[in-house]
């Protein structure tokens, strides 16, 4: 039930983000409604679900299941503080809660990896790297708040480490495991790809985060992360073929999210070199990547969370409802995100339409008779 609640609250947080943006609240508050209040707790919940699978160990302990709620609280504090509704020290408190949660979760994953039967799946190393990025990103913003002289550079490190490192590494690590599940066919190359790609992905994130000091690193960062994404898409194309990737409502969203992130990385390399405005990358990251990613992942994961254990007809029916119109949703998110990235504000209407479609199937799936 906790996982279903978190799944529904991320959709509500995305709605809040759009609402804050449209009503002209602080852009940073809107960004944190989507990223810190929405995505951050869901990522912890998803890791809690996948780590026992990756390490072939028992289900996560109760405390781990409640960790996402602490992060939701941190998310509320950040959004309220950035919107001016809470005093500035709430930011310090939120960052401290986030750092403690990230380090505690990292230690837990480390223990689970060591206790694994045999070698843990390489996806675990991606999760550990992602949590490391979150911890460093939060230390960076906390240091920036305490030391105003370094605030601009530390803020750049915070936002790139969080978006590309924390969210990006979690997403790519999970996508390699989620795509075969969505398509019901193992991908024999997934583990090899994950192992080979990780150093490039971490190098790309580090270069992008450091590009605030050395602008030329923006090209290296863009090429390394972009290369990882192209390698992943190529691997899926060879294993599954285009027709299967586009034919399933969850797989098409996950493929669309990967293509969307590739576009955002292109924009990132460009803005890093001063070739375009940087701010549209935030809404681009949300619309082109996070929206198709989260809706695609939820349509695959919510039925498993709602009906755990062996596959049942009820779980199959819930999934069928959630993936309905997945292709259309993906097109709306990518088209809307593309327009917003190009500075056309009307793209928001397409995002709203795609989100409304998902809310519709979500409500329909959740009220189906148990
Ligand atoms: C407890 C957690 C967090 C705290 C305390 C925090 C704090 C902050 C602060 C103080 C800023 C600067 C705002 C400004 O200068 O106007 C900022 C910017 C930013 N942060 Fe966070 N943050 C947190 C989590 C996250 C997460 C998880 C993400 C993404 C995954 C994220 C992404 C960003 C982005 C994209 C910006 C730039 C926003 C803009 O310029 O509009 N933050 N953060
Ligand atoms: C490979 C990917 C990326 C690279 C190499 C990169 C690089 C850079 C660099 C070097 C800067 C500093 C530019 C300057 O000070 O003039 C910058 C600024 C910025 N980047 Fe990125 N970036 C990337 C991806 C992203 C993404 C995905 C986002 C969105 C979440 C983003 C959001 C921003 C923002 C908002 C700023 C300006 C911050 C401000 O001063 O208000 N970047 N980026």
Image (cartoon, rainbow, N blue to C red):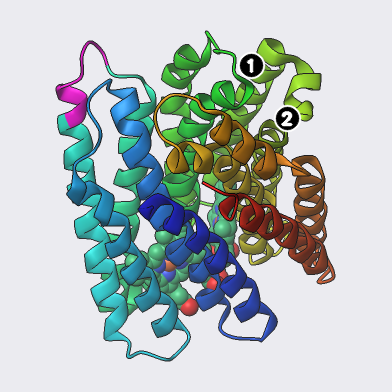
Q: Is residue 178 in view from this perspective? A: yes
| Disc 1, SS | helix
Q: Is residue 216 in view from this perspective? A: no
Extreme residue toward the front, this view = 369
The reply to whether the residue tagged 2 has its Cβ within 8 angstroms of ligand 2 is no
Side of 329 where 101 appears, left or right: left
Q: Residues within 10 Å of mark 2 (few under 14, many from 20)?
A: some
Mark 1 — residue?
235
Query: Where residue 95 appears, x then y in whole percent?
Result: 28, 68
Give the number of the mark in front: 2 or 1: 2
The secondary structure that most of the magenta stretch takes on is loop
Query: Where residue 89 appears, x then y in whole percent?
Result: 26, 84
| Disc 2, SS | loop
Q: Nearer the viewer, residue 343 or 125?
A: 125
Quick check: which quadrant has ligand 2?
A: bottom right
The disc, 2 or 1, on the residue closer to the chain's N-terminal end is 1
Q: Is residue 363 above or below residue 316?
A: below
Q: Distance of mark 2 from mark 1, alpha carbons? A: 17 Å
Q: Nearer the viewer, residue 213 or 8?
A: 8
Which residue is pictured at 65% across the width and 86% down the height?
24
Q: Which residues are magenta?
A: 112-119
Q: Is residue 150 above or below residue 181?
A: below
Mark 2 — residue?
248
Which residue is pictured at 36% across the width and 37% down the height?
49
Q: Nearer the viewer, residue 357 or 318?
A: 318
């Amino acid at each position: 039930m906790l996982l279903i609640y978190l799944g529904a609250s991320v959709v509500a947080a995305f709605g809040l983000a759009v609402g804050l943006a449209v009503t002209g609240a602080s852009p940073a508050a809107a960004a944190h409604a989507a990223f810190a209040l929405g995505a951050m707790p869901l990522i912890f919940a998803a890791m809690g679900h996948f780590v026992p699978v990756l390490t072939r160990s028992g289900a996560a302990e109760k405390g781990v299941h409640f960790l996402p709620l602490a992060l939701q609280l941190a998310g509320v504090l950040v959004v309220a503080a950035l919107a001016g509704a809470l005093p500035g020290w709430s930011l310090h408190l939120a960052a401290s809660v986030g750092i403690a949660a990230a380090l505690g979760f990292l230690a837990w994953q480390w223990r689970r990896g060591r206790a694994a039967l045999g070698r843990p799946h390489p996806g675990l190393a991606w999760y550990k790297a992602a949590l490391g990025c979150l911890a460093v990103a939060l230390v960076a913003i906390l240091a920036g708040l305490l030391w105003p002289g370094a605030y601009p550079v530390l803020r750049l490190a915070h936002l790139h480490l969080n978006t590309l490192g924390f969210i990006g590494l979690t997403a790519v690590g999970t996508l390699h495991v989620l795509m075969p599940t969505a398509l019901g066919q193992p991908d024999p190359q997934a583990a090899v790809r994950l192992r080979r790609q990780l150093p490039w992905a971490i190098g790309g994130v580090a270069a992008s985060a450091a590009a605030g000091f050395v602008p030329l690193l923006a090209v290296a960062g863009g090429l390394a992360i972009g290369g990882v994404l192209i390698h992943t898409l190529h691997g899926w194309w060879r294993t599954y073929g285009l027709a299967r990737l586009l034919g399933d409502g969850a797989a098409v969203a996950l493929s669309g999210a990967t293509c969307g992130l590739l576009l955002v990385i292109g924009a990132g390399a460009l803005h890093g070199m001063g070739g375009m405005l940087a701010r549209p990358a935030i809404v681009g990251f949300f619309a082109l990547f996070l929206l198709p990613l989260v809706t695609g992942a939820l349509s695959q994961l919510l039925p498993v969370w709602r009906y755990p254990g062996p596959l049942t007809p009820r779980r199959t029916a819930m999934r069928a409802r959630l993936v309905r119109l997945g292709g259309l949703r993906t097109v709306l998110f990518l088209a809307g995100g593309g327009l917003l990235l190009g500075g056309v504000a009307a793209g928001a209407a397409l995002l709203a339409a795609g989100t409304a479609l998902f809310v519709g199937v979500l409500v329909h799936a959740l009220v189906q008779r148990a």
